[in-house]
Image (cartoon, helix red, strand yellow):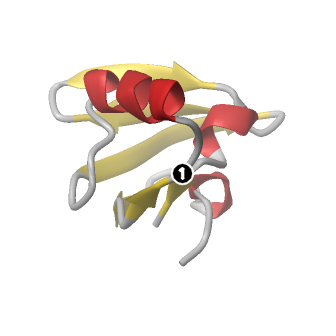
Amino acid sequence: MMPLTLAKPGETVVIRKVTGKDEIRQHLAELGFVVDGMVTVVSELAGNLILQVKDSRVALDKTLASRIMI
């Protein structure tokens, strides 16, 4: 497993684990970041990511993105 921050733009990955406190995991789950979910990295700028999750695009800073393991 590796953090989502290491995925390259254009790459589609499967979420294996979400780490962090309960509030952080709940917030990410509400955004669509759930185990076995598919995520596509749209772009990356200074470690911050634009992600395609289901039918939405979501921007995450690198600290939140590093909690998502792929």
In the picture of the structure, the residue carrying the numbered disc 1 is 19
**Looking at numbered disc 1 in the image, what kind of residue is underneath it?**
Thr
In the rendered image, the vertical position of residue 1 relative to residue 19, given as above or below: below
Image quarter for residue 45? top right
In this picture, residue 7 sits left or right of residue 66 = left
In this view, the residue farthest toward the bottom is: 1
Q: Nearer the viewer, residue 45 or 61?
A: 61
In the rendered image, the vertical position of residue 9 relative to residue 64, given as above or below: below
Q: Nearer the viewer, residue 16 or 39?
A: 16
Q: Nearer the viewer, residue 37 or 19?
A: 19
Identity of the residue drawn at 45% across and 53% down: 10
Label 1 neighbour load within 10 Å: few <14, some 14-19, many 20+:
some
Identity of the residue drawn at 54% across and 78% down: 1
Q: Secondary structure at mark 1?
A: loop
In this view, the residue farthest toward the right is: 46
Percent of width and height locating residue 17: 41, 61
Identity of the residue drawn at 73% across and 36% down: 63
In this picture, residue 64 sits left or right of residue 26 = right
Q: Nearer the viewer, residue 37 or 41?
A: 37
In this picture, residue 21 sits left or right of residue 6 = left
Image quarter for residue 29? top left
Report how many numbered discs are placed on residues in the image.
Answer: 1
Percent of width and height locating residue 34: 27, 45
Q: Is residue 62 visible?
A: yes
